[in-house]
Every structure is written in structure tokens, then in C-alpha cells.
Amino acid sequence: MVLPMEPQPASVKPLVRTIKSFVEPRSLPYRVLLSRVKRDAAGERRRDDAIAGLDAMGVPRFNSVIRDYVAHSDAPMTGDVVTTYPTTRNTSLAIDDFKSLALEMTTIWANGGSK
């Protein structure tokens, strides 16, 4: 399972509740994906704090993160998905985040679920 989480302090309790209530009782393999990560200095600090917190709790996570781009917010209105974004500098960066995640997931699967 991929469990998306915004790097916000208020996201931790719902994440833990989901893991304890739904994921662990079913013995489902999972990892947390930090998403909607702001691209400014404050966003980077929140990302780093979230990573440190997840690691301290022993919660498995992806190394890849999905940063917050306007293209992601606009996609529902335009009907685009990440593979059909128009080519611009920012959409290329947004697409790269998903490519990185796909490569990481493929590596995990190829190694039988572990890195």
C-alpha cells in the first residue's frame, strides 16, 4: 500500500490511526509517501521533520517525495494525469518526481519488498 501523507504535524495522527486500524491488522505491506511537499525553505524543513519523525517511529517510507506543483492542482480541471501534462519546465520537474517514485517502487518489488 502507498499511504500518502502531507508533511504537516496534523497528518501524523490520522496516518498512525490508518496504519493501526486498517493496514497492520490485514498484514499489508506499506510505505508512506510524502506528497504535496512545498518547494520553499519552510516546506523543506517540514519534509525533513516528517522524515525524521517517520524514521523515529519506524514507519517505512519512500525516499521519493512528490513536491507541490500547480500542474497537480490544475490536473483535475484539465483532465490531465502526470503522463499527459503539457511540457514545461515545472511540469517536467513534477513528472520527474513520479518517475523517481516509479523507479523506487520497481526496485523495491525487484528486491522482494526490501531495499
Image: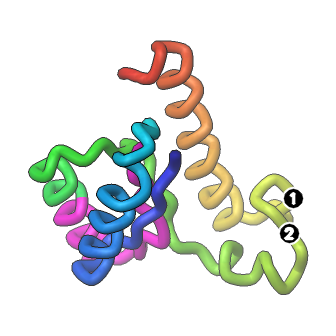
Residue drawn 75% across the image and 59% down it: 82
Circles 1 and 2: CB distance less than 8 Å?
yes
Q: Nearer the viewer, residue 61 or 85?
A: 61
Quarter of image, res 16:
bottom left
Q: Is residue 79 left or right of residue 41?
A: right
Residue 49 within the segment the image draws in magenta: yes
> Does residue 36 lie above or below 51 as drawn?
below
**Figure colour scheme:** rainbow
> Does residue 19 lie above or below 15 as drawn?
above
Q: Label 1 is placed on what type of residue?
A: Thr
Q: Nearer the viewer, residue 57 or 79?
A: 57
Residue drawn 44% across the image and 43% down it: 26
Please identify the residue farthest to the front as the structure is shown.
25
Residue receiving disc 1: 84
Residue receiving disc 2: 80
Q: Position of residue 72 (x, y in %)?
A: 67, 73
Assess disc 1: are there few (<14), some (14-19) or many (≥20) residues with their C-alpha within 10 Å of its C-alpha.
few
- Which residues, given as a range, are shown in magenta? 30-50
